[in-house]
Amino acid sequence: MFPNPNCYRLRQLSKDFTRVVADMSRDKFASLSQRLKAYVDDVSFDSHPSANGLLDTLISAKTHGYELPKEIDDQLLRDLEDLVVNEWFYGAMQSNEVRRLGLGRLAGEIKDRMVRRANGTDKQIGEDNYKLAIYSGHDTTIAPLLIILGGFDKR
């Protein structure tokens, strides 16, 4: 489950918050660009590869046992991660509207199941014996839920 990609308001808010984060992160982007100049021309949200693409590639390589150049240390990876987490989730951390729009479908599914249980209609569709319901969601859906519940650690 993931946020509705056709929601104009959510797309607009996401773009607006990404611009805010890009402005807040100019110094960090400049530092990362300098530290990675032997490998990429620029590091930003819209560079090629993007900060997100760089992080995904480097984390995947490290996880699969590839030796990274000595310049690409844990601190550099953490700095990239901080930028990417802010790119994707700063809006949800700052805006109740972004959280509501991003979480909408998952929250609706959970609410509907609770209502069916409470009013007994879960028996009609065979849910009455369920001991546990497991939901799967994209990180852009799960993060707003964690933020609302106070469990988001910005990672």
Image (spheres, grey):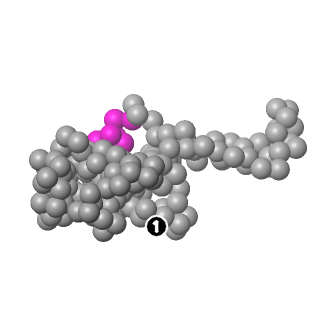
Badge 1: residue crowd in 10 Å (few <14, some 14–19, many ≥20): few
What residue is rendered at 39% in x and 31% in y?
Answer: 6
Query: Depth check: 126 or 62 in front?
Result: 62
Query: Depth check: 55 or 6 in front?
Result: 55
Q: Judging from the image, what secondary structure is the residue with disc 1 in?
A: loop
The quadrant in which residue 5 appears is top left
- State whether residue 5 is above or below residue 86: above
* Magenta stretch, residue numbers: 7-13
Q: Position of residue 91 (x, y in %)?
A: 34, 55
Quarter of the rendering occupied by the C terminus: bottom left
> Is 8 in the magenta?
yes
Quarter of the rendering occupied by the N terminus: top right
What residue is rendered at 41% in x and 64% in y?
Answer: 154
Q: Position of residue 87 (x, y in %)?
A: 30, 53
The answer to whether 129 appears left or right of 155 in the picture is right
Magenta part mainly helix, strand or loop?
A: helix
What residue is rendered at 34% in x and 51% in y?
Answer: 58
> Is 115 in the magenta?
no
The answer to whether 151 appears left or right of 122 in the picture is left
Is residue 12 at all visible to an observer of this figure?
yes
Q: Which residue is identified by label 1?
A: 153
- State whether residue 8 is above or below residue 103: above
The answer to whether 130 appears left or right of 144 in the picture is right
